[in-house]
Every structure is written in C-alpha cells, then in structure tokens.
Image: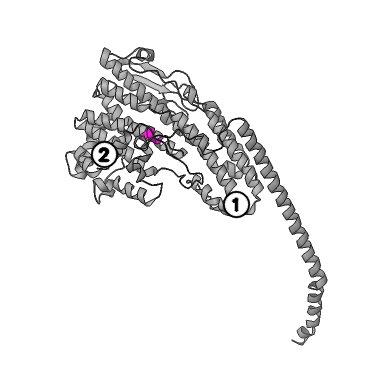
Amino acid sequence: MTSFLSKIPTYRKIFHAVFNWRIARRVLLTLAVIGTLLAVIITEENWRGQRAWDTYKSDLVAQGVPMSFAQLQPPAIPDDQNFAMAPIIQSLGAVMSKASYKMEDKLSWRALVPGGDNQVPEWDYYLYSKPTELRAKMDELRKIIGQRDLVQAMNTAFPVLEEFTAASRRPAARFTIADDLSNYADMPVTVFLNLGKIYAVRALAELDQGQVQNSADDISTLYRLANLLSNGFTVTTQLVAIAMTGFADGPVREGLVEHRWSDAQLAQMQADMHKGDFIASLQKSFQYERIRLTQILERNTVSELVGSLQGMSRNSDLSWLAFATKLIPEGWVRLNQITYSQEHLKLVALLDPAHHKVDAPTLLAYQQDRARRSRTIFNFIGIIMTSNFAGMIQHGAVSLAQLDEAQVACAIERYWLANNKLPATLEELAPKFIAKIPNDVFNGGPMHYLPGADDHFQLYEVGLGGRDDGGKSDEKDGLGDIMWPDAGK
C-alpha cells in the first residue's frame, strides 16, 4: 500500500504532462484543420456533383429526352370516358391503403368460401390446368363450396365484378400525377391480380356450364381491363396489366381445344387483346420512374431519400441505405443520380414499340455486364435502384409474346372454322382472320408456326437467347422458346 501511494505524484505528473493546455490547444487546432478540410472537400464534391448533373441534364434536354411528367401526359379526356375516374377505380386508393385492403377482402376466397381458406387452392390451381383436367377441377371446386352452379356462386360472392365490367367499357384511361408527387403510387397490385384471376376462373366455369357467350364476355373484359390499366405510370402497374392478359390463356385455350368459340366471339377477343401497345406503355413507365426519382433526389435532402428508395425496391432490404446516404455528400448523390438516369435510358432503348420488339441480344448482354460491374460510392444508388428492371423487361416480353400467340391461335381457329383445316402458313390468316401477323417479340422476325399431323400445330417465338430451339423450352437457363400450349383440334 505504501509503495502504491508513493507513486501517486508520478501518475499526476504523467496526467498533467499529457493533458495540459498546450497539448489541448494543439488537438483542438488539429481538429479544426481537419474539420475545415472536410468542409472544403464536401463543398467541392457537392459543387462537382451538382455541376456534373446540371451538364448531364442539359444534354438530355438538348436530345429531347423527357424531363417532366407534363411531357409524357396524354391529352385530357372527359371524366365520364376516363377509366381512371370510374367510381370503382377511384374507390380503390393506392397500394397498401385501407381502401385497397378492403377490396382485397372482397376479392378473396373468403368471399366464396367463408372460413375455408385452408381447404381452397390458389386461383392459379385452376388457371393453369391442362384441358383434360378442367372438368375434374371444376367438380372439385363445386364440392368445396357446396354448390353445383359455380357461376351463380361466383356471381353472388363477387358482385363487385359488375362495377369493374362497367368501368372496362370506358374508352380510355388517363392517370394524372401531381407536381409534388403526392399521388404517385402503384395501383393496388393484389386487387388487380385477384380481379384478373377471378374473371378467368369464372370464364372457365362458364365454359364448363355451357355459358359460352358469358365466358367470351369475361375474357374480353379481362383484356379491356389490362389494356386500360397499362396507361398507369409505374413499371409495376405495367407488369400487372401484362400478367392479367396471361390469366385469359386458360379459358381461351380451353375454348379453342373444344371448338367452343364462334367466329364472332374470337374476333371480339382478338380486338380486345391489343387495344393498347404494351411495349410503348412499358417504355413510358420507365421514363416516368426515371423522372420521379430524379425529382425526389433534387427536391429532398440526402437523409429524406430513404423512404422513396425503399418504396421503389420492395423486394430488397435497403435499411442500410438510410445510414449510407446520411454520410455521403449530396454531390455524390448527384453522381448516383446520373448513373440511375443512364441505366434507365439504356433500358428504355431496349424497347422498340415501332417494330414491336425487345432488343433481346442487348438485354442479355446488359444483364451479364451488370453482374460483373463494380459498385463505387459514386454509382451504388443508381445501380441498386435499377437492379430489377432488366428482369422486369424480360418478364414483360415473355408475357407479351404469349399474348401475341393467343391472338394468332384465335386466328388459326377462325381459319379452321371456315375451312375445316389448319392453314399451311400464317400468311394465309391475314387480313381476313387477323389484321397483321405479329412479329417475334425477341428478334423482330416472323413468328414460328409448324402445322402437324392430327391437326396439331406448333406456335412459338424465340426467347431471350435468340436461338430457335424448334419449339422447346429450356428450363435450365430460361432462354428457350416461348410456346403456345397446343392440345390439338
């Protein structure tokens, strides 16, 4: 104890030697110098980033690239002709709103089978059936709901369909965007996905019960809804619209296999399939998304961006970005803004509405290049926020190819009804049974058609790989042909 106490003055000397005013002044001066240097660097980086963005933006304006929503908005139309202003559409609200959740409940299995969620398969179980399975699955559904008349059961469970059908008869759709982005939101995705599946399942039930005209009407309504919805301004809305057209494949194919459709019904379905231009709509939605985020980046401080970024990448956890964006200078955000805009414009260039195609080789090369691309502090936000978009284009192109094939399959059936045989070539269909044969979405060439024995045929387009696999799909790489599922005549 005595030896320890004797050393206390020594400890005091050390303390005073280290923590004295002279050293404190030096530390404070050093911190002041470092703080000043950091302030100068941040100011310079902010100036450099803002200057780079202003120059880039001026170049885009000179090239005629849209930089405001007003440049993309279609002409105004009367409210009573506007699908977007129909009461049922106005009542939905945006995605994840209370109104949308309420509508989801109205379009769920609970409405058809109260308390029976666990015993009822998903809608897709019925939509993607083989023709030989349809009646068995319809009988299975009858047992679950305890009613023989499926159509009447669905009409009772989903009376709101009548309002959507009425809205689908409006000739156009114009969705507007406020300058402050306050109403920029996805349509309620689950509502429209469930809606499309219900129409398709009811169309199958109507076919099964011999109500062929009602089935054709439901299919046409489904196509009209999809085309009107494609006037929305988010990429997600476009993909939902395209997906809705795919739900109609089941009932359309079922009617074709059994020769249930009349020429007039087929002609009406064909007319409703392509009232819009899905490639042009998808291209415009990418432009909307680009303008949206660049405006958010310009209007908000770095720390206020996180909510918007998180909302644009729903399948990714970007909570870490909250911390990252608070640390970097706003000038670096401007540089990321350039990267984001550049990536968007690359994707927009892949879509060619004039020639009804997607540049598949460039899309595939783009996806491969992104996988090898390094991220830096100057581009990571732009890269992350466009990471899913190439896959969205691929998915949309596949769905569009299937829609084109459905239209041609209807034309083949109309030819069959008139001539009791298959056409030798697709050229025999135009213009009597189809105005124009759609080209292959992936390479711009002709759609592939091979009539076979026993009135079977192959109808397909090449996939993203751009190779003709003779009507075979490659599940390993997802680059095989996109086929219409023929079941013979």
Could you tell me residue 79's position as x and y percent? 37, 38
Quarter the N terminus occupies: bottom right
Could you tell me residue 18's position as x and y percent? 80, 72
Q: Secondary structure at mark 2?
A: helix
- Closer-to-camera residue (377/83): 83
For label 1, the crowd category at 10 Å Cα-Cα, with few meaning under 14, some 14 to 19 and many 20 or more, is few
Judge whether 371 appears above or below 258 on screen.
below
* Residue 335 lies in quadrant: top right
> Residue 209 vs residue 354: left or right?
left
Q: What segment carries the magenta color?
A: 226-230
Judge whether 465 appears above or below 67 on screen.
above
Judge whether 389 appears above or below 323 on screen.
above
Could you tell me residue 395's position as x and y percent? 45, 33
Q: Is residue 386 visible?
A: no
User: Does 229 appear in magenta?
Assistant: yes
Kindly identify the amino acid type of the residue bearing the numbered disc 1: Thr
Image colouring? one colour
For label 2, the crowd category at 10 Å Cα-Cα, with few meaning under 14, some 14 to 19 and many 20 or more, is few
Which residue is at 21% across, 37% downward?
151
What residue is pinned by disc 1? 301
- Closer-to-camera residue (132/405): 405
* Residue 426 lies in quadrant: top left
Quarter the C terminus occupies: top left
Q: Is residue 33 visible?
A: yes
CA distance for labels 1 and 2: 46 Å
Kindly identify the amino acid type of the residue bearing the numbered disc 2: Glu
Task: Name the disc covering residue 202, or none.
Answer: none
- Per the picture, the main secondary structure of the magenta-coloured stretch is helix
> Residue 87 vs residue 480: left or right?
left
User: Does 140 appear in magenta?
Assistant: no
Judge whether 306 appears above or below 216 on screen.
below
